[in-house]
Image (tube, helix red, strand yellow):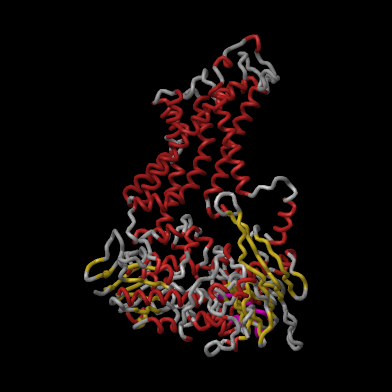
Amino acid sequence: MPLEARGIGFRYQRGPWVLRGVDLAVEPGELVGLTGPSGLGKTTLARILAGYERPLEGNVRLDGGPLPVTGYNPVQLVFQHPEKAVNPRWRMRDTLIEGWEPDPELLKALSIERRWFDHWPNELSGGELQRFCLARALGPRTRYLVADEITTMLDAITQTQIWHVVLDIVRERNLGVLVISHDRPLMKHLCNRIVDLESVMSDFPAAAGEGEVGVRPSDFRI
Amino acid sequence: MSSVDAVAVSHSRTGRLPRLNRRQRTLLVIVLSAALLLSVVAGGLLLGNEMLTTNLDQRNLSPSLEHPFGTDWLGRDMLARTLKGLTLSLVVGVLASTVSVLIALTLGMAAATFGRAVDGAVTWLVDLFLSVPHLVVLILIAFTLGGGTKGVILAVALTHWPSLTRVIRAEVLQLRTAEFVQVSRRLGRTRWWIATRHLLPHLVPQILVGLVLLFPHAILHEAAITFLGFGLSPQQPAVGVILSESMRHLSTGYWWLALFPGLALLVMVRAFDILGDNLRSLVDPRIAHE
Amino acid sequence: MIAPEASEPKPILDVRDLSVSFEQYARGLQKKTLRPITSLSVTIRPGEVLAVVGSSGSGKSLLAHAILGILPSNARVTGTLRHANENLTPERQVALRGSDIALVPQSVGFLNPLMRVGAQVRSAAHNGNAAEAQRAIFARYRLAPEVAGMYPFQLSGGMTRRVLVSTAMISGASLIIADEPTPGMHSAVVEETLGHLRELAGEGRAVMLITHDIEAALTIADRIAVLYAGTTVEIASVADFTGDGQSLRHPYSKALWRALPQNGFAVTPGAQPVLDELPPGCLYEPRCPMSTPDCTGARPEVRALRGGVVRCFHAA
């Protein structure tokens, strides 16, 4: 039963379209890579797939039905900057168990140490925080993971640790994963297939990435 | 600024004894200012009313050991009047600012969480209250409730929430877009759970600051409507009453009538201010480690 | 310490045994000391790109802040910082910051959002005709003349990078510190920005590239200093990062190299120690496959090995 995006269109207020006519599907047990120039809406698509944003056009289907509006979302999003994704006023233990109580095996696989539980987020490094965020997102009810540049800000060793855990869980639980990244070698290593966002936007707004033109992508009007 | 400076500065500080770290100093300051405020209240409550009785043999005495704050034109001990007055002011101030903060918190959170209609209604109410001259609303409410202590407290409490409501609403709106709040929702947490666990702790500093800032306002407005005759009766030992009376006697050389009660009011407001600041530095993790 | 070879120019910056610590409050009234940088030593010479590579929490940004003298006030610093053979005192840091030592910052947040970028770049110039210099530098970085009249929010990510590099460039600084100049950017922009930094070194300036991304570092650096838990575990030439890492000296550098997807994606368990729980011996000992009882007893000193520098008892 796939996670599907059908004809997704999105823009903020009356601004230009960030996404238009995006079709994308992730099957259980599949790792799909998503690339595309900066500013083309990869993060927006990630937020829509995980139910953080409602598309203006098209819809997201999980097992053929809509995403739940309340309650635990089987599609979990992990962000690029973990320090923004944890409450700075909570000790790490509370953040970890916010959705479920991760088992010791998962904590061990992610090298999360019990001594960190009583720390505040500002006492841990980005790599350590991201391990917590991933553990938090991998509850038993999670069936799809949207990983938006989750290891871009991390060193190679932490990146490897994190992805090996995800790969193990994908195999064990038949999880589907959307991997958003700029890192080609990483995606080649991880993903079953790699999708370019430009190629799945049937009607895409502007071929502007980081270019020589003195205009941001969002300055384009259609 | 520079690390080497920091080392030098900390060395020069070690000369003082006994050296407390900042958190210990903060707690000490909190305890001292709380003790000061409590002793004012205790003093005010324990002093019997006999000190306030008219004693025409001892009119207009300048400060002495027997009457540290002097006496007024009716021979009443000014220290006793001041303490009584401060206690009353403190009660009015604390009650009024607590009620205001509670109103602001409820309305601010509701506006930011319950959708556009509630937000519109709250914003309208805030604008309405802020557009009418403050003193007019105060007098109106106090007058409607028949004046007296109850009238003053309610009038002050019901008129000081709008600006804090705005602050809290803005804060909650911003917090709701924070990733950790949005994650919580996708993890199946309810709005109420998120409001109490995620939002409320972030609002504590705002609330503390709100309380501190409202407190002098509340006291001064209490004095103001009392002065205008809609508040406490002249027989009650309010600081507002004392100060407005003493204005008439200043030019005749009875300086102590205004100086000591005014100074005492200032010290109390300042103690409250310090208390709030130090509490905030303990509860805010961003500055708690400095 | 390693004596530089006679043919090499004198270092523009010499950091020796730098330690930075902070005091924080633990539970209640107890204070604890955090030591994010422990006896860190690096040198950088004119015309060289030195990459400082480490994970988040390895102290690499604090190193930049220590050099620039912009650490928070509760930081305590020991060790020596020498710039052009003179001690880098706080007064000299203030004097040199922005003129002879320039920072290419991580984020756009360093630009004033209310000031046109041309004016901001010009304000960094210290001698000569600022307007002319700014026009020349914009032309060189393929920034259209009208970009000078734009505000930071109007720039694309790539253009912002070029403006930030322009600021460092126009200052005429002899030492440029680039702190994570390419965070999460598209590969084309990363390459372009790194290319600009390489060019600056080509003009005889010293460039310190601080990054967590070893691949980015390898594309332009001459030497790489690998940081772990606040100390330099190895300083190696770029040429040592090859094959399965057999030329590398420290087990952490090897693990870092082998963790890259193209080099086997090998897992190393464990995590960098948290600042208030540094191990008493070698900082890498808890994760090290080569660990022996010696390693738990004392911290290894840096020593020269095969043309590089390593901090390990067992490296050969």
Most extreme residue toward the top is B57
Q: State yes or no: residue A205 in magenta.
A: no
Q: In the rendered view, does C219 fall on the left or right side of B68?
A: left
Give the vertical position of B105 relative to C152 (above or below): above
Most extreme residue toward the bottom is C243
Give the vertical position of B11 relative to C129 (above or below): above
Q: State yes or no: residue C203 in magenta.
A: yes
Quadrant in which the N terminus of chain A appears: bottom left
Q: Can the viewer see residue A217?
A: no
Query: Measured from the top left, where is residue B99 in percent x and y?
Result: 43, 36
How many labels were placed on the picture? 0
Q: Residue at x 58, y 62 (%)?
A: C276
Q: Can the viewer see residue B69?
A: yes
Q: Residue at x 50, y 40 (%)?
A: B211
Q: Which residues are magenta?
A: C196-211
Residue B142, image quadrant: top left
Q: In the rendered view, does B103 fall on the left or right side of C173?
A: left
Most extreme residue toward the front is C293
Quadrant in which the C terminus of chain A appears: bottom left
Give the vertical position of B285 relative to A187 (above or below): above
Q: Residue at x 36, y 52 (%)?
A: B193
Query: Measured from the top left, where is residue A187 in percent x and y?
Result: 41, 81
**Between A210 and C5, which is closer to the camera in this rendering?**
C5
Residue C9, image quadrant: bottom right
Query: Measured from the top left, where is residue C58 in percent x and y?
Result: 58, 70
Give the vertical position of C298 relative to B24 (above or below): below
